[in-house]
Image (cartoon, grey):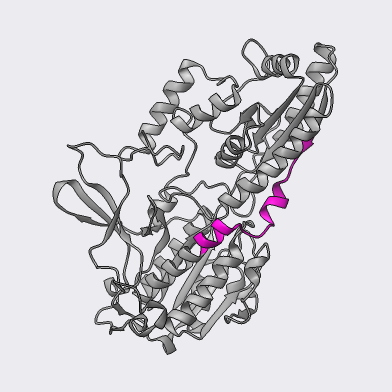
Amino acid sequence: MGLESNSMPKIVIGDFGYTLEDVPHLSDFIPDLPTYPNPLQDNPAYSAVRQYFVDYDDTIAQNIVVHKDTPRGTHFRRAGPRQRVYFESDDVHACIVTCGGLCPGLNTVIREIVCSLNYMYGVKSVFGIHGGYKGFYSKNTISLTPKSVNDIHKRGGTILGTSRGGYETKKIVDSIQDRGINQVYIIGGDGTQKGAAVIFEEIKRRGLKVAVVGIPKTIDNDIPVIDKSFGFDTAVEEAERAINAAHVEATSFENGIGLVKLMGRYSGFIAMYATIASRDVDCCLIPESPFYLEGRGGLFEYIEKRLKEFGHMVIVVAEGAGQEMLSESLNQKDASGNKLLQDVGLWISQRIKDHFSKERKMTINLKYIDPTYMIRAIPSSASDNVYCTLLAQSAVHGAMAGYTGFTVGPVNGRYAYIPFHRINERQNKVVITDRMWARLLSSTNQPSFLSTKDVVEDSMDNKKETPNYALLENGFADVHK
């Protein structure tokens, strides 16, 4: 979309190297706003809770792996209900929009935003924007009530419809202002969150009392800072089923090869985690890890060795892997600004067939499986449903408390409010010099395909991208060990 936000970070510095990357608040640009008692204090559901409300000073540390002389480091504001709110329930007119590609859990997030607003805060006026960003000015709205969204979590997709592109800031904010909307919940990936940041800036410029909240969505899990994105666990589970099918095909034929292409335009998390979960994969190829086909130590040599030793093989390839080797580059982008990719699965399948039939004179039986759209369209799993519920409730608590211009997500297992610029500054990627990738290599026993130069470059790139972060053991780029 070519969107840029000019917002200055809201930084609070404390003792012993403590830094709070705070999120904007309506009171920052609208003076003398009235506040009201939080209706949760009279909500029977919270009657047994020992502490109703989050303390104002509660923050979540981004880095939890420390040494005795480590500064306290970067923190984010803790998510949750506040003692005072900046909206009266009857005055709230909230809208929800879903943008970009499909992902398991979209309907669950929609459902829980509606139910949280209604059941916890008594908000009755909630509606959906149909068809993504362009729906603000070109589509009808959909009234959303707890009754109308009651069972939508059992369906895949989004009941609101979605689209890529269609972003026009002035038209969108004009629509928000004309409709009297004062809470906007935007569910989408990095491009969508960039759009949300620009919408917030325009709303702030106009001095409107409108809370803009992002709920990060990407099936590839390529959004930084947060532990993971919703729908990721479901995607890994469904991907494992495709891998199991490929394994059955491969083991049923002489020199059988099952090749599965999974999502992962720039980040190979689904391929990596599905490979480790399956334990039937012999080779996993992801965008972050260069590989080559021919010559000593190449993929063809490894395939031949594997077939001679075991008689079959399963290969998993992320959609963004090996793009630099494909003969033609599309040099085109979709409406969301993502580069259009060649089908690496079909390409590598044909290269494997040609190599073994023409050069090695060896008969192979290769079966190619692409479950991409089957995975995107399924309902979310139980764990993702829980995650979506916590995301939605945290988002609603933040908006009612007057916070705006933020996205919500778990940081080291605790839910936090994160400024848009941190979500939009880069993409989360697998660190191939980290322990998680090493675990995968030890599981598949595949060659790393890495030269010393590749390792040095990856380590240098990772230092440039994550100068102050610690690495967890999950292979996420925000996290180091």
Query: In the visual, does 27 lie left or right of 281?
Result: left
Residue 126's spot in the image, x, y percent? 53, 81
Residue 431, compared with residue 77, is above or below; it is: above
The extreme front residue here reads 48
Is residue 376 covered in magenta? yes
Residue 301, compared with residue 312, is above or below; it is: above
Query: In the visual, does 114 lie left or right of 13?
Result: right
Residue 215's spot in the image, x, y percent? 48, 62
Q: Nearer the viewer, residue 85 or 67?
A: 67
Residue 71: image quadrant is top left
Residue 335: image quadrant is bottom right
Q: Quadrant of the C terminus?
A: top left
How many marks the image carries: the answer is 0
Query: In the visual, does 394 lie left or right of 60?
Result: right
Q: Residue at x 58, y 66 (%)?
A: 108
Is residue 273 covered in magenta? no
The answer to whether residue 70 shows anywhere in this view is: yes
Q: Write the start and end of the magenta stretch as one range.
A: 368-388
Residue 379, compared with residue 62, is above or below; it is: below
Query: In the visual, does 50 lie left or right of 342?
Result: left
Q: Residue at x 50, y 70 (%)?
A: 170
Residue 387's spot in the image, x, y percent? 50, 59
Q: Quadrant of the N terminus?
A: bottom right
The answer to whether residue 181 shows anywhere in this view is: no
